[in-house]
C-alpha cells in the first residue's frame, strides 16, 4: 500500500497535495434513471431497487462534480434541483452496517 508520501497528482505529477472539505450541498447537473436491477445476487437491497436515479451533482462553491445515487422521486428530478448529501445504511455485513452516500432534496 502506498503511503501519503507516495501519492502524486495524476494530471501533473506533483506531490504538493492537500486534503480539502467538499461540503454537503450541491445542484443536480445531469441524471439518468436505472429501470432494471443490476445482474447477480446483491446484498444491498437499497441499491437494487428500481427505478433508481443516479446523478451528477455539482458541489456548491467548487468546480467538483460527483456521481451518486439520488434519493428523490423520479417525477421530481430536474436539472438545477438543490440537493444535500445524505448517508444511508446499504446492508449489514457480519453484524456491522455498511454505509454509503447519496443525495436527497435540500
Image: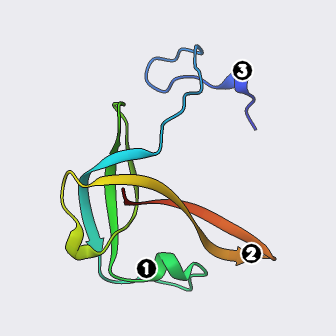
Vertical relation: 81 (above or below) 21: below
- Going by the image, does 30 lie left or right of 34? left
Question: Which is more toward the observer, 15 or 44?
Answer: 44
The answer to which quarter of the image holds residue 104 is: bottom left
In percent of width and height, residue 70 lies at 37, 64
Q: Helix, strand, or loop for circle 3?
A: helix
Q: Helix, strand, or loop for circle 1?
A: loop
Residue lying at the far right of the rendered structure: 95
Q: Residues within 10 Å of mark 3 (few under 14, many from 20)?
A: few
For label 3, the residue is: 5
Question: Which is more toward the observer, 37 or 88?
Answer: 88
In percent of width and height, residue 64 lies at 37, 36
- Going by the image, does 98 lie left or right of 68? right
* Quadrant the N terminus occupies: top right
**Which of the labelled discs sits on residue 28, or is there none?**
none
Q: Helix, strand, or loop for circle 2?
A: strand
* Quadrant the C terminus occupies: bottom left
In percent of width and height, residue 41 lies at 56, 86
Q: Residue at x 71, y 26 (%)?
A: 4
Vertical relation: 89 (above or below) 51: above
Q: Residue at x 48, y 39 (%)?
A: 23
For label 2, the residue is: 93
Q: Residue at x 43, y 83 (%)?
A: 49
Pointer 3 or 1: first along the chain: 3
Residues at marks 1 and 2 touching, judged by CB atoms closer than 8 Å: no
Question: Which is more toward the observer, 44 or 5?
Answer: 44
Q: Give me the C-alpha separation between circle 3 and circle 1.
A: 38 Å
Q: Residues within 10 Å of mark 2 (few under 14, many from 20)?
A: few
For label 1, the residue is: 38
Of circles 1 and 2, the one toward us is 2
Q: Give me the C-alpha separation between circle 1 and circle 2.
A: 20 Å
Residues at marks 3 and 1 touching, judged by CB atoms closer than 8 Å: no
Amino acid at each position: 500500500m502506498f503511503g501519503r508520501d507516495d501519492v502524486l497528482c495524476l494530471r501533473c505529477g506533483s506531490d504538493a497535495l492537500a486534503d480539502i472539505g467538499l461540503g454537503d450541498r450541491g445542484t443536480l447537473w445531469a441524471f439518468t434513471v436505472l429501470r432494471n436491477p443490476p445482474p447477480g445476487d446483491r446484498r444491498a437491497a437499497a441499491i437494487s431497487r428500481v427505478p433508481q436515479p443516479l446523478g451528477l451533482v455539482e458541489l456548491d462553491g467548487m468546480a467538483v462534480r460527483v456521481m451518486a445515487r439520488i434519493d428523490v422521486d423520479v417525477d421530481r428530478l430536474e436539472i438545477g434541483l438543490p440537493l444535500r448529501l445524505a448517508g444511508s445504511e446499504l446492508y449489514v455485513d457480519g453484524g456491522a452496517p455498511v454505509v454509503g452516500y447519496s443525495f436527497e432534496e435540500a
